[in-house]
Image (tube, rainbow, N blue to C red):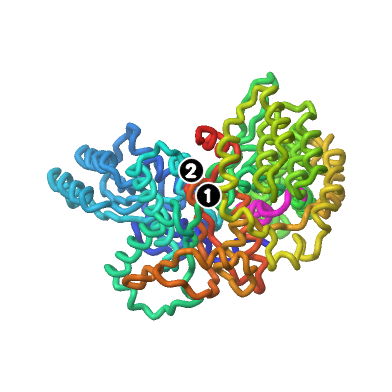
Amino acid sequence: MSYTDEVSLRDRQIALIVKMLMFNQDTSTDDLTSGLDCQEVVWKALVMDSKGTAIVSSVLRVNDLLKAGVTVHSLIQQKRSPLPDVPVVYFVQPTQENVDAIVQDLIEDKYAEFYINFTSVLNRELLENLAKQVSATGKTDRIKQVFDQYAEFVVTEPDLFSLELPLVFRQLNNPESTENSINELCEAIANGLYDAVMTVNSIPIIRAPKGGSAEVVARLLESKLRDYVINTRSNTDSVPHSLERFVLVILDRNIDLASMFAHSWIYQSLVFDVFKLARNTITIPTKTKEGQETEKKMDIDPKDFFWSANSHLPFPDAVENVEAALATYKTEAEEITRKTGVNELSDLDPNANNDTLNIQEAVNKLPELTSRKIIIDTHMSVLASLLSQLESKGLDAFFEIEQGQDSPKTRQRFLETLKDGKTNNLEDKLRTFIILYLTSATDLPQTFIKEVESYFESQDYDIRSLTYVYKSKGLMKLSAMSLQNKSLESSGFDGKNQSSSTNSSVLLSGLSNKLYGLTEGKIQGGVGSLISGIKNFLPEKKTIPITNVVEAVMDPLNSSQKNLETTDNYLYFDPKLVRGSHNKKPKRQSYTKSIVFVVGGGNYLEYQNLQEWAHSQPANTKNVMYGSTAILTPASFLDEIASLK
């Protein structure tokens, strides 16, 4: 099952950008591939800054822009050739530098008509400055539109977004950060969240724990939303304070540090962890025939059918499914070649005058088949590269250890893995040690800790990040929360009860012997049955602290008492009420939709765990969007906390 059954946040942002490219006129559909075919397209130039480029490139490709009439797209900072007969659409941040650049383009008659779109709210001072400068040029008639688009967040998955604000956790937890710098940062976070809420087009109830940056951001956002409600009189609408209102849960990263380091068996999480996944582009390090290091980039199109159906599944399932997809493609291709008498699909000429019905049908199917084969080949390559990395780094061992409960046996297994002679996975070893430390119900033995530290020192490996980890365990307010959740206890990963994590751990121990030895050329043919067996060994699905919090807020009737006691103490803000909403203890109520936002960094593990919970609900009744100040790899988060004391 794909997690894209409803109108997603990505769909909404695509619709917003398409509308902007059509000069802010309503389009008939969110789907660029069909909606614009029926409309008169005006050719235009698109000028963006780095933020605008990040927003657009995460959801649209060059062909999509072409369908919207964009023949040229460029950066505002670059030297651009004049196109005096062509209208221009700007999509830039509301800064003085960008305002000045737009006015300079106007002075130089660089474009015929100017449609100005800011990624977020243009403040009054900048608006007046823009008006004053434009008026001085005497070319006011060239400015056709000025819009605030409320779009300053990057969407990479249907319901996952990032503000792409760097080093937020470090800034918020560094004693040397000034109060002014923290306030400015929280203001920027609140502005980004405001844009996401405007895109969802509904005023939420806001919940946040007391103390810390989450509360600061919640209060700032409440103020902005209340001003919006007052100014637009939207508080007179008839929507009751019930299921129709969605809930925005704002949390601090310190709620659960362990999830930032965990190894995951989910396809998407593995790609993000092992390779580089940014704005729907996978970057895989490879070697040329000459042995030189290079990078191979692969685009994941928002319409990629395989990614949509498999990104949230365990890696073994994805391997099995890509083989099935390839087999289906081959069957269809062979059927076409048999009917038409050609040897290869490439022998079919789409431009030929084909009177034969079979050939005409084959030619009609050709574009879809070709597109599907490209997608299958892409994922074949990615999965084969992942297999290679699994073998090289022994990643299954870390996943296995992290699934078990802390015990002398688990610690001994880790020490054996630690001293396995591999040095290309020191980061993985450190991450698993951090997981053991943070999730252990009691303090780990000092002898064990010293032995682990001595190993890393012998490898001359930087473990400064442990300073903050040791300190943080006492700060993790939810470290005692249950890792198991009622709604998933009765339903395992495949909808049936799985073996216990202890038994799964034993079964998983043979994974490397079965998987490894597979090379890129051997991913197909015979691997399917092997993977099919392995996937049954996976531990039962656990929920993590952030999911337990969300369940307690969204579905209190099915949450544990311990989780409810925690979330009952969260602040409650209702921007539709004039005052005092956070002074009273909120009633427990159910919600069907939520945005969950983590201040200080997020990850794909939490996103997928929340989606797993939401789609395990009866009749698919819950919808959860997940966002953060940035989506961080474990490596980047380790670097971020290394300087914290």
Most foreground residue, 359 or 101: 101
- Residue 374: quarter of image: top right
- Residue 182: quarter of image: top left
Type of residue at label 1? Arg
Q: Which mark is residue 169?
A: 2
Q: Position of residue 15 (x, y in %)?
A: 45, 59
Say which residue label 1 marks: 253
Most foreground residue, 510 or 566: 566
Residue 421 visible, this angle: yes
Q: What residue sits 18% from the left and 52% below the top?
A: 141
The mark total stands at 2
When the figure is inspected, residue 630 is found, relative to residue 521, above or below; the finding is below
Main SS, magenta residues: helix
Disc 1, disc 2: CB below 8 Å?
Answer: yes
Inter-mark Cα distance, 1 to 2: 7 Å
- For label 1, the SS is helix
- For label 2, the SS is helix
Q: In the figure, is residue 232 to the left or right of 69?
A: left
Q: Which mark is residue 296?
A: none
Most foreground residue, 628 or 432: 432
Q: Position of residue 552 (x, y in %)?
A: 58, 67
Does the segment drawn in magenta span residue 311?
A: yes
Find the magenta span and give its range: 304-316
Q: In the figure, is residue 465 to the left or right of 135?
A: right
Does the segment drawn in magenta span residue 121?
A: no
